[in-house]
Amino acid sequence: MALIEKLKLLLVELKNRILLFKSYKAQMSPELLYLYQYQNEKLNRYDLIVRYLMIDYLLGKNDSGRDLYIKMQMSRAGGNKKFELDFLNKEKGLKDLVVTMQQEGYRDKSPIISNKDNRLFDGAHRLAAALYFKVPTVTVVRSQDSNPSYGMEFFAKYFDDNEIRLIQQTEKKILDEIKPKEVLTEILNSQKQEFGRGIFYQSFEEIDIVGQRPTEERFKIYGLAQYLTPSMKVLDIGSNCGFFATYISRHVKYVEGLEINQSLVDISNMTKLLLGRKNINFQQGDFSKAKFNNTYDFILSFAVHYWIGLDIETYARRLWNMLNANGYVLFESQNIEVQDVDWDEKIASFLGGGFVEIESGSLCDDNKIKRKFSLLKKI
Ligand SMILES: C[S@@+](CC[C@H](N)C(=O)[O-])C[C@H]1O[C@@H](n2cnc3c(N)ncnc32)[C@H](O)[C@@H]1O
């Protein structure tokens, strides 16, 4: 190959690498990056907490942070002398980082490295320090495929009960200091959203979040307090940011939310984690393809059937099959002047498919779109 061709190829390769690098680079608050280290409400990176405690120790705020840190580094080495030395040498790096942070603030020169799901690969000292000193944002490069895990199983093996208790108390303190509204808004803004007109689609009064549609008001308009009971299992189809599902979780035994958009599922899961709710489960998925292991006493189908795209008979049949005996569907339209001009025919399909109508109503809760709803009971 001629030299000029080789150079051209090299240039293309270089350009692609730069593009790839750019698309993988993000600015993120340390709180949000920390929250991404949770999976099913379990923290996979307790090493961050130990580093946090070590920083606290270096600033003279506790006595045990260094012991925990040294123990953790030795345990990570798993008896390998070379690794032990490498890990122990990192203590100096952390000390230097703390001094620099105090003198100059966070120097965001070398990015934190994660995988595409923001799971930490490299930069745990920097993330712990950024969290500790409440730095506004850090740079993250999502360039790795793998990520190490230091979950509670690892720590339970090497640490005693008192040490675990301190680690867990510190974890709770960090979570308590995170402001839900700020991190949830950060995720919302990190991706262009189809629904919500630039703000959340659903409001959540409990954490001071304004949305296109007011959750507590909707709950009242539908008259849900009258029908939901503490023994019920509920499914919310197209649960969006999960605020409606989280709100009603206080009224029922269990709520499941299915949502096609992963960033909305992230918001839902983080809300659940930050509010400490246990009886909710959010899944990413497309309703038209999803398989369900559960059956439900109450299904919420709010402004979603049009997006799912199944014909209404098939949709009604599917919901009927997913309901327990005497179960309910609360079926809400899209815009009755646009997508649901044939709303009465749609309700007729439900009535012909094994449901009776218990209640019906209309709402215009966002002062823009007129909708109707119907409470249908399986017979
Ligand atoms: C108009 S919003 C309604 C949100 C929520 N049900 C409410 O009324 O507050 C429609 C939601 O359904 C989700 N969605 C669209 N198609 C879906 C599908 N096939 N399976 C699950 N969710 C879907 C969208 O991402 C969006 O969050």
Image (cartoon, rainbow, N blue to C red):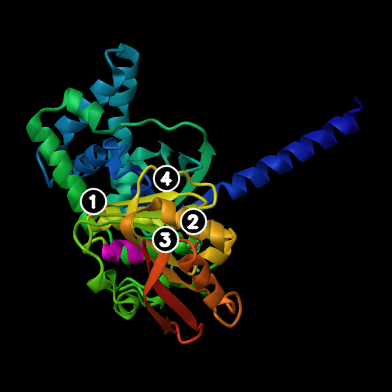
Q: Are marks 1 and 2 in contact (CB under 8 Å)?
A: no
Ligand 1 contact, mark 3 (Cβ < 8 Å)? yes
Q: Are marks 3 and 4 in contact (CB under 8 Å)?
A: no
**Residue at the disc numbered 1:** 278
Residue 175: image location, x then y, percent: 24, 53
- The residues bearing labels 1 and 4 have C-alpha atoms spaced at a distance of 20 Å
In this rendering, position of residue 107 left or right of residue 313 = left
Q: Nearer the viewer, mark 3 or mark 4?
A: 4
Residue 214 visible in the snapshot: yes
- Amino acid type of the residue that numbered disc 1 sits on in the rendered structure: Lys
Q: Which mark is residue 239?
A: 3
- Image: magenta residue range: 241-248
In this rendering, position of residue 168 left or right of residue 12 = left
Establish if 101 lies above or below 147.
Answer: below
Ligand 1 contact, mark 1 (Cβ < 8 Å)? no
**Residue at the disc numbered 4:** 292
Residue 8: image location, x then y, percent: 84, 37
